[in-house]
Amino acid sequence: MSTLSALVESLRPRSWTKNLFIFAGVLFGRQWSPEAIGITALGALGFSLLAGSVYLVNDIADRARDAQHPDKRSRPLASGRLSPAAAWLSAFVLASGTLSAAWLSAPRFALVCSGYMLMQTAYSFRLKHVVILDSLVIAMGFVLRALAGVELAQDCGFAVEISPWLLLCTFFLAVFIAFSKRRSEVVTLGEAAGEHRAILRDYSPHLLDEMIGIATAASIMSFAVYTVSERTAEMVSPMLWTTIPFVVYGIFRYLFLVHRRGLGGSPDRILLSDRPLLFNILLWILSVMAVLRYFPAKGNA
């Protein structure tokens, strides 16, 4: 039982909130039927299990360094509660089982999942050691999540597409979160940051603040351009721009938590524990649904 609980912990269920990006396609594509939501939820669960296998591989590769980290040393592999052999076996079973089921039922969804798996494996063993690219790879993972949801819906016969501007917004928002996490690591570990991970020597709070600022502006601007574009007015809603304030507040609230509360090292914990941010996200989702419901696209009016 202790091994099972350690395995579940290593799958990082808290981090599965990232897979909510899979719902972007059905949300903005107005595919809100129980069938569409149910299929997307199954896809999110499958993607979560696949991501869990990636976390296992990553923790295997990092277990020696994690053992020296003030927070990560309590992870099952770093603390010795889960053996590398059990982790490897579990990762193989989860990845092969999930991908096999995906290829049999939704090939295009499976293709995106396979690309995600390959990218994250390369990240675990090499790309995480390349400055800046390490954070960009994390950001691409969020883009692939959004694409996976779209491809799954299309595999199942739903008319869903996603705007390149929305994908850009997803990318820059994820870059913002990734650099905020690096900033937290550099500030928290201080002089010992490079000992835990050599790449952290190449970062500084000032450099990260500059890149966070750029990512912040790009996130807001790309979402704003998406909402006011003629294509969005014709295919989604001409009033989607009214949801911009929620996006601005959410990003600024996150910045506040990073700079004034010393958070940022664990994005999933921020999303699940900060009530103003969580409430804002809920209001944003409800406002998007209300706009799409009461102010339909010109083509659907």
Image (spheres, helix red, strand yellow):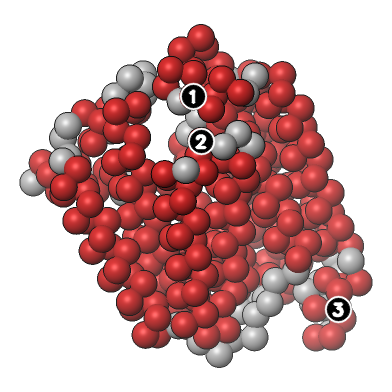
Identify the secondary structure beneath mark 2: helix
Q: Which residue is mark 2?
A: 129
Viewer-proximal residue among 213 and 89: 89
Q: Would you say 263 lies left or right of 300 here?
A: left
Q: Quadrant of the C terminus?
A: bottom right
Q: Determine which quarter of the picture holds residue 132.
A: top right
Q: Determine which quarter of the picture holds residue 210.
A: top right
Viewer-proximal residue among 169 and 203: 203
Q: Residue 274 in the image: x percent, y percent?
A: 53, 34
Quick check: 110 above or below 139? Answer: below
Amino acid type at circle 1 is: Ala
Q: Residue 189 in the image: x percent, y percent?
A: 48, 15
Circle number at residue 198: 1
Quick check: marks 2 and 1 in contact, CB under 8 Å? yes
Mark positioned earlier in the residue sequence (1 or 3)? 1
Report the residue that reaches farthest toward the top.
191
